[in-house]
Image: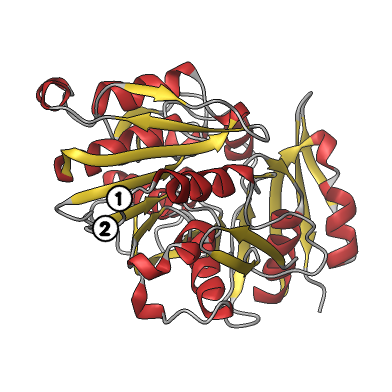
Amino acid sequence: MSDRMTTPEGDYALTRFPEDPRDLLRAWDASDAYLLRHLAESGTRLDGTLVVVGDRWGALTTALAAHRPTQITDSFLSREATRANLARNGVEADTVRLLTTRDTPPDRVDVLLVRVPKSLALLEDQLHRLAPGVHEGTVVIGAGMVKEIHTSTLRLFERILGPTRTSLARQKARLIFCAPDAKTAGARGDDPWPYTYRLPDDIGVLAGRAVVNHAGVFCADRLDIGTRFFLRQLPKAPRGGRVVDLGCGNGVVGTAVALADPDAEVVFVDESYQAVASAEATYRANLPEAGGTVEFRVGDGVEGFAPGSVDLVLNNPPFHSHQATTDATARRMFTGARRALRPGGELWVVGNRHLGYHVTLRRIFGNSELVASDAKFVVLRAVRRS
């Protein structure tokens, strides 16, 4: 859904990515508007190096494009939304510098604007990575909805950068003001990410093996119970077949496939740059001299895969888009999987029982089989018939 955001900088037509006329969620929220209004009303100087972190759909970057910002995001979809929104509003692409969370941040940061992410770990990692470029004159402002900003959020800013306070709430949004200082810089300590742990002994081929997690990856300090259940049910792909770990997270599912079949071609795909980096690190930690073919892709599901080029897709789809609960991502993943699978190829899905994925799979594939279930999760199988 395209919508217009009115700001002191002007009016902007914005949409999420990929654009879907059925999507009723906006590409901006009250915290974006609050931050932009504050910058204008306070007369904050935006010359020097302006860095925008975690801009979800490019609203801030588009509105501030005249100041030539650097955007840093962990999301492929957010990055593509930014490109699309810049073009939609007549902004030249080279006006903005687009970086990912895996890129080296600017050496100097004069204004730092942070959309508070859902993951505290990702915020911690990004503040650590940006801290060397922050100086005592840097303007640091965070923004988020009230429900997204907690005491722990403020403590991170304070521990890593300097004294921190919050604004009054407006339209359920709040700003964070942080004043970097030398005392904090000398005591902040090291970035604890990435984090490595060992898997439990009851999950098959991956028992006792290492998992590497970069900040922001789901369940970064332990194996989540859905994936644990899925690992016990994994199918055997055709020997040497092409298998996609779709929404790979830290890559444990695809790594299990590669360990079980050294001849398999395994493709790890996620829209998170942190996730794909984690998947590659997990794979390399467990198969340092693997002879099979492996690929790591950041992208929108299986977009770009040739039709009929995949034998098996394994998927644990997310059902949140930031703070919103939605099945739109799962629908796109299932539809893309059907297109990428060869006739006879299979999609295996794990999900919470209450999400009703069996209905969606029947609508897309024409079939859905219950493989396994427990009190909370189901594993479903759908076959591309033709």
Pointers 1 and 2 in contact (C-beta within 8 Å): no
Provide residue 97's location: percent of width, then percent of height. 32, 68
- Left or right: residue 248 compared with residue 350: left
Q: Does any portion of residue 116 appear in the rendered image?
A: no
Using a 10 Å C-alpha cutoff, classify the residue at mark 2 as few (fewer than 14 neighbours), some (14 to 19) or many (20 or more): few
Give the labeled residue for mark 2.
103
* Point 41% across, 79% down: residue: 93
Residue 204 position in % (x across, y down): 50, 34
Q: 151 or 7, which lies in front?
A: 7
Q: Which residue is mark 1?
A: 287
Q: Secondary structure at mark 2?
A: loop
Label disc, if present, on residue 31 of the rendered structure: none
Circle nearer the N terminus (1, 2): 2
The quarter of the picture where residue 294 lies is bottom left
Picture layout, residue 226 above or below residue 109: above
Count residues near mark 1 (Cα–Cα under 10 Å), then give few for <14, some for 14-19, many for 20+. Answer: some
Which amino acid, by three-letter code, is at mark 2? Asp
Between label 1 and label 2, give the one nearer the viewer: 2
| Residue 278 in sight in this render | yes
